[in-house]
């Protein structure tokens, strides 16, 4: 059974009625459990759980310290191409948006890699728009070959692939996959993706599992918060991560919590996700999935990111730029969205240390690169 097949059993679930019927005593009961079931996750995402967010936060902190300690893993994104064939209403890369389009040459990839490597980071996330003719598998393999000389871990956040295509990229040097479903509401998904290959909801929702099947070391999922009711989106994100974690125990499963940010095109989300809402989501995730990584990106402000560190965060981006080639050149009008936390890697590391956390630039070394270290 795929996650999509499992998801079908919940599409007609009366969420509103369930959430309205949750009582405070049910929230307390869910909070006190050592292992949460699916209905407990939904209970902790309910309005009745809001008075207990502080209790959720304290338990989330304890679980995070037990599983991860005070370590915060740092990485940075690198945009290879922003050509796209999709018409996603909420994305700055929408093919109809008038932005500067470009794809990095291999020489430019090396310059970007060298610049990022100067910060000390050894993990990188590469991104593209969805335009296979511009950034296909062969192009990506060429980029990965260059990046391997600078980074020990290469993650991809690109268009969904078939299992054999993921296998090709893994063979080239990729070890991690990030792919967001954007919204788990299938009807809304179709409305938000009127044209383009991304319109195929099922192909996208099952992509994380294809990545697991192909042999990815790490897979990261999430929804773009603000597109739909956040309680529903968080519930399905949690179910998706739990499904992958249970079925593929050898894969490190993580969750991201991206909120909508300003971008070219001016799409206005209909749903508000407050800081308090995001804290409730994060702490509910930690209680439901104690071993899952949780990523908070530079979409969030520096002050907010610092304040939520103890509540379950394990991964943070730093020195981020959402423009193609943005680490070595400044070009306006070509970014995917605006970032909020503009701190560089060194500044981020210093801030983490002051808050009592240990910034980690490297936590993975491919076996073939270990040499005598593996003996």
Image (tube, grey):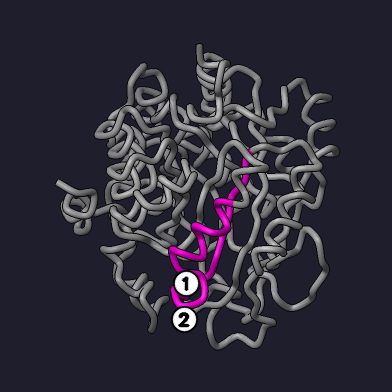
Residue 135 among magenta residues: yes
Per the rendered image, the range of residues in magenta is 123-145
Residue placed most toward the observer, 142 or 153: 142
Q: CA distance from mark 2 to mark 1?
A: 6 Å
Question: As drawn, is 38 to the left or to the right of 78?
Answer: left
- One can see residue 79 in this view: yes
Which of the 4 quarters of the picture holds residue 31?
top left
Residue placed most toward the observer, 366 or 187: 366
Please tell me whether mark 2 sits on a helix, a strand or a loop.
Answer: loop
Residue located 59% across and 27% down the image: 363
Task: Point out residue 316 in the picture as x, y percentages from the top left corner.
Answer: 65, 40
- For disc 2, the neighbor class at 10 Å (few under 14, some 14 to 19, many from 20) is some
Residue for badge 1: 130
Q: Quick check: 175 above or below 169? A: above
Task: Point out residue 347 in the picture as x, y percentages from the top left corner.
Answer: 85, 39
Which of the 4 quarters of the picture holds residue 74?
top right
Question: As drawn, is 96 to the left or to the right of 342?
Answer: left
Please tell me whether mark 1 sits on a helix, a strand or a loop.
Answer: loop
Q: Quick check: 70 above or below 348? A: above
Question: As drawn, is 270 to the left or to the right of 202?
Answer: right
Residue located 27% across and 43% down the image: 213
Residue placed most toward the observer, 6 or 283: 6
Question: As drawn, is 142 to the left or to the right of 169?
Answer: right
Residue located 55% across and 88% down the image: 96
Residue placed most toward the observer, 277 or 287: 287
Residue 170 among magenta residues: no
Task: Point out residue 2 in the picture as x, y percentages from the top left corner.
Answer: 19, 49
Task: Point out residue 297 in the picture as x, y percentages from the top left corner.
Answer: 64, 48
Q: Which mark is residue 85?
A: 2
Circle nearer the N terminus (2, 1): 2
């Amino acid at each position: 059974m795929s996650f999509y097949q499992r998801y079908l059993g919940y599409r007609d679930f009366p969420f509103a009625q369930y959430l309205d019927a949750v009582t405070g005593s049910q929230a307390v009961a869910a909070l006190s459990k050592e292992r949460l079931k699916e209905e407990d996750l939904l209970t902790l995402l309910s309005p009745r759980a809001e008075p207990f967010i502080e209790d959720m936060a304290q338990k989330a902190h304890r679980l995070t310290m037990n599983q991860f300690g005070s370590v915060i893993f740092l990485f940075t994104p690198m945009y290879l191409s922003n050509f796209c064939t999709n018409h996603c209403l909420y994305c700055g890369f929408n093919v109809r948006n008038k932005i500067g389009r470009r794809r990095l040459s291999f020489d430019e990839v090396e310059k970007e890699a060298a610049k990022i490597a100067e910060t000390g980071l050894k993990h990188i996330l590469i991104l593209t728009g969805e335009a296979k003719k511009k950034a296909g598998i062969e192009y990506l393999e060429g980029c990965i070959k260059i990046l391997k000389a600078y980074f020990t871990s290469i993650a991809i956040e690109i268009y969904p692939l078939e299992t054999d295509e993921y296998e090709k990229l893994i063979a080239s040097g990729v070890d991690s996959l990030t792919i967001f479903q954007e919204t788990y509401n299938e009807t809304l998904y179709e409305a938000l993706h009127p044209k383009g290959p991304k319109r195929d909801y099922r192909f996208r929702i099952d992509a994380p599992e294809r990545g697991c099947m192909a042999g990815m070391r790490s897979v990261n999922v999430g929804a773009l918060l603000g597109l739909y009711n956040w309680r529903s989106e968080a519930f399905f994100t949690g179910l998706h991560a739990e499904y992958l974690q249970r079925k593929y125990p050898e894969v490190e499963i993580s969750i991201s919590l991206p909120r909508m940010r300003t971008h070219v095109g001016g799409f206005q989300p209909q749903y508000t996700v407050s800081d308090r809402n995001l804290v409730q989501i994060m702490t509910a995730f930690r209680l439901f999935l104690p071993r899952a990584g949780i990523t908070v990106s530079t979409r969030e402000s520096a002050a907010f990111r610092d304040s939520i560190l103890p509540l379950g965060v394990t991964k943070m981006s730093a020195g981020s730029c959402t423009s193609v080639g943005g680490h070595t050149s400044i070009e306006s009008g070509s970014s995917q969205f605006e970032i909020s936390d503009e701190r560089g890697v060194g500044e981020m590391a210093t801030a983490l240390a002051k808050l009592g956390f240990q910034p980690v630039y490297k936590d993975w070394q491919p076996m073939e690169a270990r040499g005598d270290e593996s003996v």
